[in-house]
Structures are given as C-alpha cells and as structure tokens.
Amino acid sequence: MRQPDESAKHQDYISFGRYVARRCRRGGFDELAALAASATDDVKAAGRAWEDAAEGVQEFMADRDMADDVLDGVVRRCRRQLLARSVSVEKQGWFKAIFHSGVGYYIAAPLDKEKARYGEFVALLRDNLEEGDELLEQVPGEVEQGLSAFGEAVEAMGQAEQGRLLARSRLERAKDNWRRTMERLFGALTEHFSSRSEADRFFPRGRRG
C-alpha cells in the first residue's frame, strides 16, 4: 500500500480515502469503510477550513492595500494643490519642510511606519500652512479616516493570519490521523486475507503526492 506523500495536497488524501472507503464497502467490510470515510471526511473538513481561512487573509490584505492607496492619493492630491498655488512653491521653505524627503517618504512608507509617517505629514501641514487654509479643513480628516481603515484592516488581517495558521495545524493533524487509519486498514485487510497483495487491491495504485 502506497499512500500519498506527507507533503501531498489534502485533495490527494481525499481522493485516495474515497477510493478506499468505497472499495471496502463494496467488498463487504463496512466497519473498515466507515473508518476510511470518517478519516477522509476529517481531512476534507480541515482542508476546507484552511482554504476559507486563507481567503480571509487575502480579503483583509485587499482592505489594507486599498486604505494605503487612499492615503497615498490624499498626499499626492495635496501636493498638486500646493504646487498649483505658485510656480515657485517648491523653492519655499514651508513646502520643503512638508515634503522634506519627497512625496515618496509618505507614499512608500513601510507598513509598520504608515501611521507615524502620515501623522507626521498632518503635523507638518498644520505647522506650515496658515490657519484657515482649505487644505487644513480637508486633509487631516481624510488622513484620520484612512489611518483608521488601515489600522482596522491590519488588525483583521493579523487575526485572519493567525486563524489560517491554526487551520493549517488542524489540517496537518487530520492528515496524520488519516495516514494512521490507512495503515490500520491495510493491517486489518492483510490479516483477513493473509496476503499483503490481496490487501493492496483495496488501495489506489501508484498514487504519490
């Protein structure tokens, strides 16, 4: 009896297990068929849970990246509006103070520095623009909303990633139990037929992951 490799996809375990359960049932070994079906169903359920958890990570990653794009858009729009005020804006000290390291300092910020960089951007705007400036009426609020959405997505993504790791662990345990079950079935069939070759007929041939 040649089982799928330990590194095989859980779908390979399911396909193999379904064959064994059906073959045992057709051969009149109902108890063995039930054992095979149960172990295979466990792998199937754990595999689906892991797939669902992985999808959740991707969804929250999309939320995070969208929030990041919105924040980047706020900075770019703000810079364009400031540049439109005068041909010499870029040479003025207050503009250089806000964009001291270029616009990329904000829009290319590492994820773990996103909050700090955009907080700095708002602080520099407030420090360098005159009170009542229209940008001060818009930008801080937009940045606050963007950072809130970004933070929520990051937190949700972290929880989803933890859930994915736990689901993966449960899947590996289900696969380990499945392998032990198949060994038990092979032993029981070998004892019944007093022949390993006869027992081997109840398992798919040449199935490697």
Image (spheres, rainbow, N blue to C red):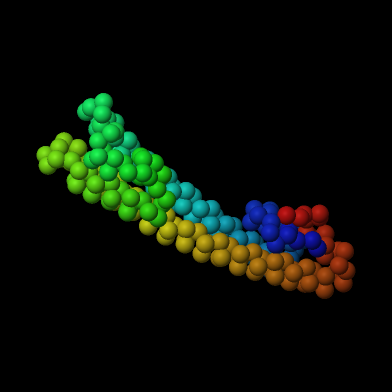
User: Where's the C terminus, which quadrant?
Assistant: bottom right
Q: Left or right: 99 with respect to 3?
A: left
* Residue 201 visible, this angle: yes
- Of all residues, the one furthest to the left in this rendering is 132
User: Where's the N terminus, which quadrant?
Assistant: bottom right
Q: Dividing the picture into quarters, in which one does residue 45 lie?
A: bottom right
Q: Position of residue 15 (x, y in %)?
A: 68, 53
Q: Left or right: 137 with respect to 100?
A: left
State the count of labels. Answer: 0
Q: Position of residue 50 (x, y in %)?
A: 53, 57
Question: In the rendered view, would you say 84 is above or below 160?
Answer: above
Question: In the rendered view, would you say 192 is above or below 207?
Answer: below
Q: Residue at x 19, y 47 (%)?
A: 127
* Residue 22 visible, this angle: no
Q: Residue at x 56, y 61 (%)?
A: 168
Q: Position of residue 34 (x, y in %)?
A: 65, 65
Viewer-proximal residue among 198 and 29 = 198
Question: In the rendered view, would you say 174 is above or below 125?
Answer: below
Q: Dividing the picture into quarters, in which one does residue 70 lie?
A: top left
Viewer-proximal residue among 84 and 93 = 93
Q: Position of residue 90 (x, y in %)?
A: 29, 33
Q: Residue at x 47, y 62 (%)?
A: 162
